[in-house]
Amino acid sequence: MKNTLITALSALSLVSCATGPNAQTGSVLGALGGAAVGGIIGSQSHRGLEGAAIGGALGALGGNALGNARDQRNGYGYGQQPPPPQQQGGYYDNRGNWRQGPPPQRGGYYDNNGNYRYY
């Protein structure tokens, strides 16, 4: 029975190898939480170490699955980086049209009323 359980858990742990940052964090936090809960539940039947091992493995799998789902929602594919953020900057030109990107560099001065005048 133990050999079957160990084989099944090791096979499951090798199947879900998601590599995003949330998947890795979820695996670690899930393993720690699962080991703690499994140890507490296992200690009720005087098998705390086995309960911690099983809880840690199942917690790591669950945390990896949840972290991978969050990575997929945030745009991380398998081994891909997220797309670069879109530039939000822009300006209105002299005719009132919105232009994407930085405004052209032109010289000018402030008049007596505080308005900026271009050359």
Image (cartoon, helix red, strand yellow):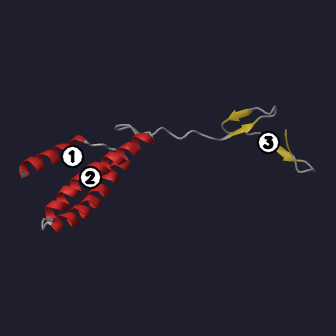
> Any mark on residue 107, and which?
3
Can the viewer see residue 103 in this picture?
no
Left or right, residue 82 beside residue 105: left
* Residue 84 drawn at (x, y percent): 50, 39
* SS label for mark 1: helix
Between 29 and 84, the one lying in front of the other is 29
Name above or below for residue 68 compared with residue 45: above
Amino acid on which the number 1 mark rests in the picture: Ser
Considering only order in the chain, which callout, 2 or 3, is on the residue closer to the N terminus? Answer: 2
* SS label for mark 2: helix
Q: Which residue is mark 1?
A: 13
Considering only order in the chain, which callout, 2 or 1, is on the residue closer to the N terminus? Answer: 1
Considering only order in the chain, which callout, 3 or 1, is on the residue closer to the N terminus? Answer: 1
Nearer mark to the viewer, of 1 and 3: 1
Instruction: Classify mark 1: residues with Cα within 10 Å, few (<14), some (14-19) or many (20+).
Output: some
The quarter of the picture where residue 46 lies is bottom left
Q: Residue at x 32, y 57 (%)?
A: 29
Give me the C-alpha separation between circle 1 and circle 3: 63 Å
Name above or below for residue 51 compared with residue 1: below
Q: Which residue is mark 2?
A: 60
Quarter of the figure that contains the C terminus: top right
* SS label for mark 3: loop
Amino acid on which the number 3 mark rests in the picture: Gly
Amino acid on which the number 2 mark rests in the picture: Ala
